Amino acid sequence: MATTFKEKTVYQIYPKSFLDTTGNGIGDLNGIRKKLPYLADLGVEMLWLNPFYPSPQKDNGYDISDYTAIDPLFGTMDDFEALVKEAKAYGIGLMLDMVLNHVSTKHEWFQKALAGDKHYQDYFFIQDEITDWQSKFGGNAWSQFGDTGKYYLHLFDKTQADLCWRNPDVRNELFGVVNFWIEKGVEGFRFDVINLIGKDEILKSNPVNEGKPEYTDKPLTHDYLRELNEKTFGRHSHLVTVGEMSSTTIENCLLYTKPERKELSMTFNFHHLKVDYENGQKWTKKPFDFEALKTLFHNWGEQMSDGNGWNALFWNNHDQPRALNRFVDAKNYRVEGAKMLAAAIHLNRGTPYVYMGEEIGMLDPDYDDMSQYVDVESLNAYEAMLKDGLFGNAAFEIIQSKSRDNSRIPMQWDETAHAGFTTGTPWLAAGKTYPSINVEEEIRSGSIHAFYKQLIKLRKELPLVARGTYAAYLAGNPNVYGFTREHQGEKLLVLNNFYPVSAPMDIPEDFSKGAILVSNTGRDSLGDTVTLKPYETLAIHLKNE
Ligand code: TEU
């Protein structure tokens, strides 16, 4: 039986950094084709590819100038079609990144608008008066629209102009884009910041949270998603969709994902990746708050389970520093910690996403110098921190731990120059650890990759893992994140020690008679009590008698 999005594991590829086959220092589509056997062996059934469309690359491809072509940097349409076909032969579908909230100011629509074409001016938010909203990459969210004396809205970089979804012509253009790629044979879509599309007719200032309440999760967003569903992917039952939801709520994510609402298959939210932010601010440094992390997992897990919604589960992506650097004492427990983090989401309720390199325990690059960073967000933040009076070193340390470039470094394939990613000069320097942490070495002598394979397989084989309900377990424990799953009388207890200390605890009577399904310590027997080792993960399966 073909798997649904509940049994699948998605693997995220940042094409620019995966594998370069031309020597220009930039990863390409043919690099992905070359590694299909590796991905099939891992067991993943869907590849989410970050944008590879023509783009000035101000925001690494999230500034799209042509939605229905391939940037020559990454290859050709023939390469793409071959990739779709070859992936399919391995049982792997492609999930494309659709950036439909904004376009590059180099896109034909914006250029025509600038040249005075009224039809295209209505595609954007162009006004005389501005609001107090802040761009997510720093500064005000409005910039001058040519020399007209008016301003256009950009919630991200000033080269990313927000599209006005209230205009039916805009919606139809974008639906056409999605259908174009469906016809090319893709099997899924990841919709970038899609909960920002339902903006009001009259945009209002709001000093709260940089203006976010004025444009986030607006009721209209749900209407637009239903229309998008009806006119594009909803016509093909096998397509998988995930919405990237900025600053969202459980209530809205239930609406976005309940099957009967016909919006999306699942949603990403980022609350659990802000538990190491000081006062909710990204450009700060503090140890993660385990209580907050656990409470978020339990609230989202239980409420999405009770309400029949569906979460996308992830620790890493191209916008985040590596979770291993954030949540684990990676210096001493990299291997144990990588497996524990993996089990905590792969045995959870939702669809797990693996970000390239996670399956070999990759770490942040630990660059020595600010000049090695290239991301627009990091460069702006660094300037802003200096302006705010932070000394260079303090600001640099924050960039080192928070920059999006941390995850965008070249995939570490082997110990040769630039981690085997390119024979040329990589667009972003490889991380320091590649001589020891790389795919070749990991498969030869490591155990993280094999552990991921086991988890990915379990989800396909055990309906309890793929479909079981979620309930919090031992919510008060200061070290352990525990939960139970249940499906047709079968049960699973999952315990994850998030600290480098031992954690003694009782095992509920019924589970003490269960079988160990997953362990990262080689544990092979159970009693009424257990003392979890540092970063131990333990999953106990209670079968239906
Ligand atoms: O990201 C949306 C976004 O707002 C993130 O930067 C988010 O704030 C961050 O992950 C939370 O820590 C998406 C893309 O993933 C990102 O790469 C783009 O730059 C952005 O949209 C604009 O398209």
Image (cartoon, helix red, strand yellow):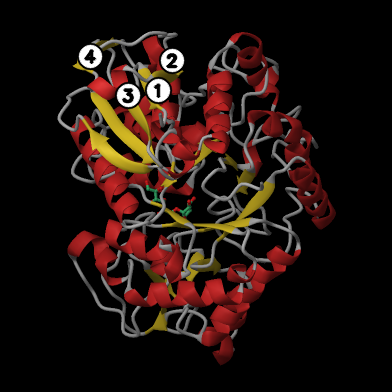
Task: Specify which label sits upstream in the sequence, 4 or 2.
Answer: 4
- Do the numbered discs 3 and 4 sit on residues whose CB atoms are within 8 Å? no
Q: Position of residue 531 (x, y in %)?
A: 25, 10
For the residue marked with disc 1, what is the amino acid? Met
Q: Secondary structure at mark 1?
A: helix
CB of mark 2 near ligand 1 (< 8 Å): no
Say which of 420 and 238 sits in front. Answer: 238
Mark seen at residue 520: 2
Query: Which residue corresponds to mark 3?
Result: 496
- Do the numbered discs 1 and 3 sit on residues whose CB atoms are within 8 Å? yes
What is the distance, in whole Å, between disc 1 and disc 4 at their CAs? 14 Å
Residue 454, compared with residue 459, is above or below; it is above
Q: Secondary structure at mark 3?
A: strand
- Do the numbered discs 1 and 2 sit on residues whose CB atoms are within 8 Å? yes
For the residue marked with disc 4, what is the amino acid? Ala
Mark seen at residue 297: none
Task: Specify which label sits upstream in the sequence, 1 or 3.
Answer: 1
Let me know if residue 116 appears in the view. no
Q: Secondary structure at mark 4?
A: strand
Q: Residues within 10 Å of mark 3 (few under 14, many from 20)?
A: many
For the residue marked with disc 2, what is the amino acid? Asn
Rendering quarter of residue 297: top left
Query: Which residue corresponds to mark 1?
Result: 340
